[in-house]
Amino acid sequence: MAHEYAHNLLVENFPAIRRSLRVAVVSETYPPEVNGVAVTLAKVVDGLRAANHAVQLIRLRQGGTDVACEDEVHPPYQEVLMRGFPIPRYPELRMGMPSKSALIRLWQLKRPDVVHIATEGPLGWSALRAAMYLKLPVSTDYRTNFQSYSKHYGVGFLHKPIMAYLKKFHNYAHCTMVPTEALRASLADAGFQKLKVVSRGVDTMGYDPAHRSEALRAQWGLAPDDLAVVCVGRLAHEKNLVMLLQAFEAIVARDPRARLVLVGDGPMRQELQARCPNAIFAGQLRGKSLAEHYASADLFLMPSLTETFGNVTTEAMASGLPVVAFNYAAAAELMVSSVNGSLVPTDDADGFVAAALALAAKPLQRKQMGIEARQTSLQLDWTCIVQKFEDVLQEVIDQARVTTA
């Protein structure tokens, strides 16, 4: 009896071995490009490979010297580079070319178990049509609010056709992954189907309060007790940076020694430099330098209302920073006001300024909130996120098998 019990205990405590999958991942953005989609997708690809899945990454060629990587060691890894062209007003990003025939040939030679499409541009559409032609299981990501961006670039009249295209695109797939429950509910109300919430993780070793650098703060012209306010992201109108400046101008009116640190680049840079000449413009940063800029600040302001998630929110929290943000995207999912940050209703601009002012004046509260923010971020381990991603891929494969049987 004891032997039988021990055997059952062992069986119950060891998870079932997952079958290795052949996963084709299609994206029009990937590192070294710096944006939330690229960074997140790279973590997912690395996680899939670490979990023993064979990955074929289909991405755009980034410059004339870009070379595809291949790794025949188990599990196999292959990159396929496709042609693209610069996106208007986003010259640092590229959009793919229609490639349906090329993808059909590729997947006929080496048929994947599932195709995951991360972007909805021409390459993504081609991948969707090729997968449908070959009757391959397909999952997609809804990662970028194109319909919101259109309002900031003078083409708001395109909102309805863009939403119609996105709905058509994603509803063709067997499943669409979204990063938050709020976004799932919003898209469901708009007619999107087969939605699954798969959150995003954060590298809590890469982003850590331990990376704080007094030498860097001295470069910013700050003494140890002076206030550094940081914002990380593209310097563009869709990021609501006018709201950021209003909040910081209120802070510096009370505390003239406070400094604003902007990490990122974009079309608003000259406008922002003219309005806030004393700000630190660090440009685009990666790796250790980016982590040091987060950790060396004292307060993170997140004014954007166009994110589907907002990786910078979780990176700031992992770096031990209190965050002031609108009750939206990742902040709405992860933050509790007065505990690990300050949440403001999305229609309350004055409230955003007031919340920033309040935390700017309370160093002890900022420190405690930063500790709590760090603790919250530790729950966003990438291993768990990738495991959820794997689960959804397997569900997509099983569903496709049933519908084609």
Image (cartoon, rainbow, N blue to C red):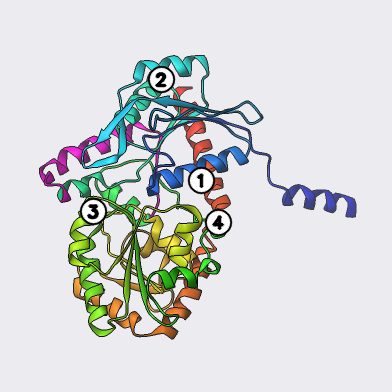
Q: Quadrant of residue 29?
A: top left
* Mark sitting earlier along the chain (1/4): 1
Give amino acid for label 1.
Lys
Q: Earlier in the sequence, mark 4 or mark 2?
A: 2
* Residue at the (53%, 36%) spot, across then down: 394
Residue 41, position as x, y percentages in the image: 45, 42
Kindly indicate whether the residue at mark 4 contacts the one at mark 1 (C-beta within 8 angstroms). no
* Residue at the image position 42 percent from the left and 65 percent from the top: 334
The amino acid sitting under disc 3 is Ala
Determine the CA span between mark 1 and mark 4.
Answer: 11 Å
Q: Secondary structure at mark 4?
A: loop
Q: Quadrant of residue 105?
A: top left
Q: Which mark is residue 381?
A: 4
Cα–Cα span, label 4 and label 3: 30 Å
Q: Where 117 falls versus 370 (above or below)?
A: above
Magenta-drawn stretch contains 123: no
Residues at circles 4 and 2 in contact by the CB criterion of under 8 Å: no
Say which mark, if any, is on residue 43.
1
Residue 162 lies in the magenta stretch: yes
Q: Residues within 10 Å of mark 4 (few under 14, many from 20)?
A: some
Q: Which residues are magenta?
A: 152-180
- Element under label 1? helix
Q: Which residue is mark 3?
A: 236
Q: Position of residue 237 (x, y in %)?
A: 20, 55
Question: Which circle's residue, 1 or 3, is located before the other in the chain?
Answer: 1
Q: Is residue 379 visible?
A: yes
How many C-alpha atoms fall within 10 Å of the one at disc 2: few (<14), some, or many (≥20)? many
Task: For label 1, count other residues whose C-alpha is less than 10 Å away and answer few (under 14), some (14-19) or many (20+).
Answer: some
The residue to which callout 2 is attached is 103
- In front here: 218 or 359? 218
Depicted 180 relative to depicted 77: above or below? below
